[in-house]
Amino acid sequence: MTSVGFDLDMTLADSRAGIAATYDELAARLGVVIDSAMVVSRLGPPLEVELANWLPAEEVAAAADLYREIYPHLGVPVHTAMAGAYEAIAAVRAAGGRVIVVTGKNLRDAIGTIKVLGLEVDEVVGSVFGARKGSALARFGAAAYVGDHVADIEAARAGGAVSVAVATGPYTVGELRDHGADVALADLTEFATWYTSWRPHDELR
């Protein structure tokens, strides 16, 4: 059975409002300035990497713990599905495939987001970014990996999967192609048509 991997934030889930609200609350509690609009314009890297832009290194770990305490209550409930997300998942399932979510978001909040949105997925792997996603993709035999970040292209390469990039994150279609995406789509509304025509053969699993 063929598997297709998907990133979560800004691929299947529009998490910008929830993440921004959590950063705003975090900034208020810590008494620091964090530009949440800037943060959500470049989603992808791990939480600690982003926090390091706003806080001294020695304060990042505690701030990350506080963020993760706030996020399930303030962030997750306001997430929405990206355009085409349900249809993309349905296309994989209609072909008899499995849907795997491999994300940098921690497992608890990834599962929470998936439940809030009612996404029908088979496996969830959290807290991995870039090429580190490759082992999970390989383990589940993902024939393709869909993501919005150039690091997701690295993930697909590391996992031996076709890289399908969607320009719903910080990069344009052209930039994603320039970074080596095998397929670059404007958004997930284009995925079902592409997938139906591509439909991986047994040797690609």
Image: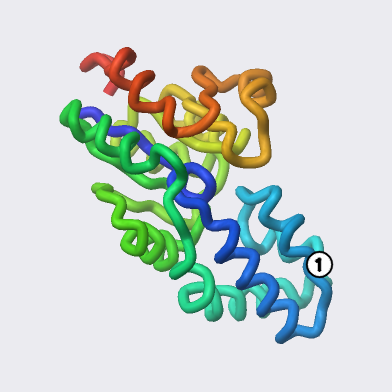
The residue at 30%/51% (across/down) is: 119
Q: How many marks?
A: 1
Most foreground residue, 63 or 165 = 165
Most foreground residue, 61 or 118 = 118
- Image height check: is 112 above or below 180? below
Q: Position of residue 160 (x, y in %)?
A: 42, 25
Mark 1 residue type: Trp
The residue at 57%/41% (across/down) is: 130
68 horizontally vs 119: left or right: right
Q: Which residue is mark 1?
A: 54
168 horizontally vs 96: left or right: right
Q: Position of residue 139 (x, y in %)?
A: 32, 39
Q: Position of residue 173 (x, y in %)?
A: 62, 24
Quarter of the rendering occupied by the C terminus: top left
| Mark 1 burial class by Cα count in 10 Å: few <14, some 14-19, many 20+ | some
- Image height check: is 96 above or below 198? below
The residue at 35%/63% (across/down) is: 116
